[in-house]
Image (cartoon, grey):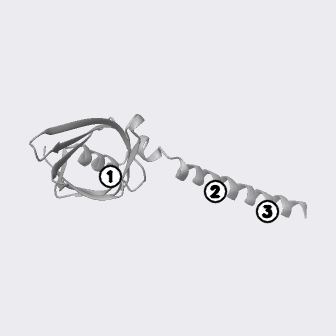
Amino acid sequence: MKTKLMKYFGIVALLTIMTSLTSCEVSFGSWYDDDDYSEYYYRTTQELCSRTWQDSWTQDGKYYTQLLDFYEDRTGTDIMRVEHRNGYVTEDRYEFKWKWDNSSQTCIRMSYGSYGTSYFEDVWMGSNTLRGILDDVDVKFTGIR
């Protein structure tokens, strides 16, 4: 009886340990960004960082242009240029730190320090286009350099 009990206890202990190790691996948030050395990971990151991404639109009689640059050292710049009706132009430049926020590399977390955090979700890249939802707004950027 004792050996059967010990045998089942050993099996339960082994299963518990295996489940715990798997759970730790999945829930470790920075694993995808800091320690993933796969070819797919670098190919996607290189594509994101290979050019300046530009989006333009008109709103309230103003012409807006947003330029995003992602760098492989996990920093970036976000430039917002506004051309007003009277010809006056303003341009704001923001620095951010970024990282992939999921294993499939379809979400980017962009931390602007004291300005807050933006999320670029449902990211799709192809044919010189970067599309997704940036802070709840559908966007489509075109690569320019």
SS type, badge 2: helix
Q: Are marks 3 and 1 in contact (CB under 8 Å)?
A: no
Closer to the observer: label 3 or label 1?
1
Alpha carbon separation for disc pair 1 and 2: 27 Å
Measuring from the top left, give residue 48's x and y in whole percent: 26, 47
User: Considering depth in this image, is 114 or 132 the residue closer to the camera?
Assistant: 114
Name the side, left or right, on which 14 lies relative to 84: right
**Figure quadrant of residue 58:** bottom left
Amino acid type indicated by mark 3: Tyr
Badges 1 and 2: C-beta atoms under 8 Å apart? no
Quarter of the figure that contains the C terminus: top left
Which kind of residue does numbered mark 1 sit on?
Tyr
The amino acid sitting under disc 2 is Thr
Q: Which residue is mark 3?
A: 8
3 or 1: tag closer to the N-terminus: 3
x, y percent for residue 17:
67, 52
Reading the image, the residue beneath label 1 is 40
Under tag 3, what secondary structure? Answer: helix
Which mark is drawn over residue 73?
none
User: Which residue is tagged 2?
Assistant: 19
Q: CA distance from mark 3 to mark 1?
A: 42 Å
Residue 110: image quadrant is top left
Assess disc 3: are there few (<14), some (14-19) or many (≥20) residues with their C-alpha within 10 Å of its C-alpha.
few
74 above or below 132? above
